[in-house]
Image: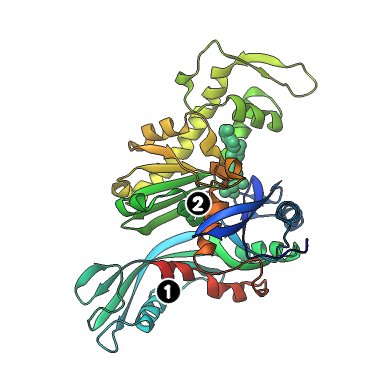
Amino acid sequence: MARKQSFHVALDLGTHKTAVLLASMNEDEPHVVGLGTAPSAGLRRGVVINIDATVQAIQRAVHEAEVMADCEIQSVVVGVSGSHIKGFNSHGMVAIKGHEVTSSDIEQVHEAARAVPLPADRHILHVLPKEYVVDEQEGVREAQGMAGVRLEARVHVLTGSTPVVENVIKCCNRSGVTVSQVVLAPLASAEAVLSEEEQELGVGMIDIGGGTTDLVVYQAGSVQHTAVLPLGGNHITNDIAAGLQTPVAEAEKLKQRFGSAVSSGVRSDERIEVPSVGGRGPRVLSRQILAEIIEPRVEEMLGLVAEEVTRAGVEGMLTSGIVLTGGTANLDGLAALAEKVFHVPVRVGSAAHSGGLGDIVSGPAYATGMGLLQLAGKTSSDSVMSPASAGVLSKVKNRMGDWFREFF
Ligand SMILES: Nc1ncnc2c1ncn2[C@@H]1O[C@H](COP(=O)(O)OP(=O)(O)OP(=O)(O)O)[C@@H](O)[C@H]1O
Ligand SMILES: [Mg+2]
């Protein structure tokens, strides 16, 4: 445990699993050398509801990753999710002091854009610039150095519930690690699975995990809309357990092995063995019955995302379609069903990774973890060795969203 190297560490605190990814960076690409996972028992719909259970899962995952990489983890970049996350568009305006935009003008216009009244229990997680306007010139990406007298920033602001985020940080600290950055998990997933071309043309990223379904819409290289819905793969599993009268753990196995989101694609003569509850013997049922339970639930989940897209008025932005990720994206037929719901091309996306753990971390369930590493790599040089940042929100707050400003 003595060897200390310069690594980035991501903590994805999911409803289904807690994952710690430890990576060295190779030209901005994370090379994962340590991975630890533990089932999450302390979260519901992306939010911590049991501190002790969450701490245990983090400790287990951290320990596993430390042993694998032979490193000591001190601080992590942690992802937060849950339907408490709210995004809205805002703008700010300042006078350009020296008739040419400087970095200090840009800082000030961001400050102006984030100066929105918020309830006492909410705070800003990220301020994502969409475009600048210099005098009458709209659609400016890089304002610094431009001549003008008035600078306006149009931004997307993401806020979270302060107690919810504080609980995440508290769990990390009690587990023996400090938090260097708090990042909205869907932004991390989008970073991992979307190409620059897709972000430019317009695309929707949907991360369907165990307890949440996250949506991020990009266009013109910027985040245009975000939403977190409190639905995920666990709901499909529960439906299977209730519908087939089988224990939840067995329903989970059936879903993963034999599940499909398109019942018409499953042959009616395919049979599966379904364990029973209460000591009764297993039954042999048609695999199509399983798909008939899964399909309407998935259709409902995707339908709610489609409603959100319409409500936000961003359906016209999905020019290059939709990219599905998160563990539930492994479900057979999901992309086909999503194409029917959204009427755009759909693909399943995950982070490319060529290292030794590539077969695991390039699965869609690790998109958030991989994205957290990529975003961490864009700013801080080291999240293992960095001086221990205090584990309270006030101290972490300064780092939130900073890199988005940097690489816009
Ligand atoms: N082959 C598969 N078929 C169907 N579902 C799958 C498959 N593999 C994993 N899943 C589902 O993926 C979900 C877990 O996904 P993931 O690991 O992305 O969740 P999470 O990040 O822990 O949760 P969340 O992001 O919602 O807080 C579970 O519901 C699991 O059943
Ligand atoms: Mg997740």
Determine the secondary structure under disc 2: helix
Q: Are marks 1 and 2 in contact (CB under 8 Å)?
A: no
Question: In the displayed structure, would residue 183 be above or below residue 317?
Answer: below
The spot of residue 396 in percent (x, y) is 59, 72
Looking at the rendered structure, the kind of residue marked 1 is Arg
Q: Is residue 54 left or right of residue 216?
A: right
Disc with the residue nearer the chain's start (1 vs 2): 1
Q: Which quadrant of the structure image shows residue 74?
A: bottom right
Question: In the displayed structure, would residue 253 be above or below residue 320?
Answer: above
The answer to whether one can see residue 166 in this image is: yes
Residue picked out by circle 2: 189
Q: Is residue 71 left or right of residue 118?
A: right
Give the residue furthest to the top: 269
Residue picked out by circle 1: 114
Determine the secondary structure under disc 1: helix
Which label number is shown at residue 334? none
Looking at the rendered structure, the kind of residue marked 2 is Ser
**Is ligand 2 within 8 Å of the beta carbon of the residue shown at mark 2?**
yes
The answer to whether one can see residue 82 in this image is: no
Residue depicted at 74% across the width and 51% down the height = 64
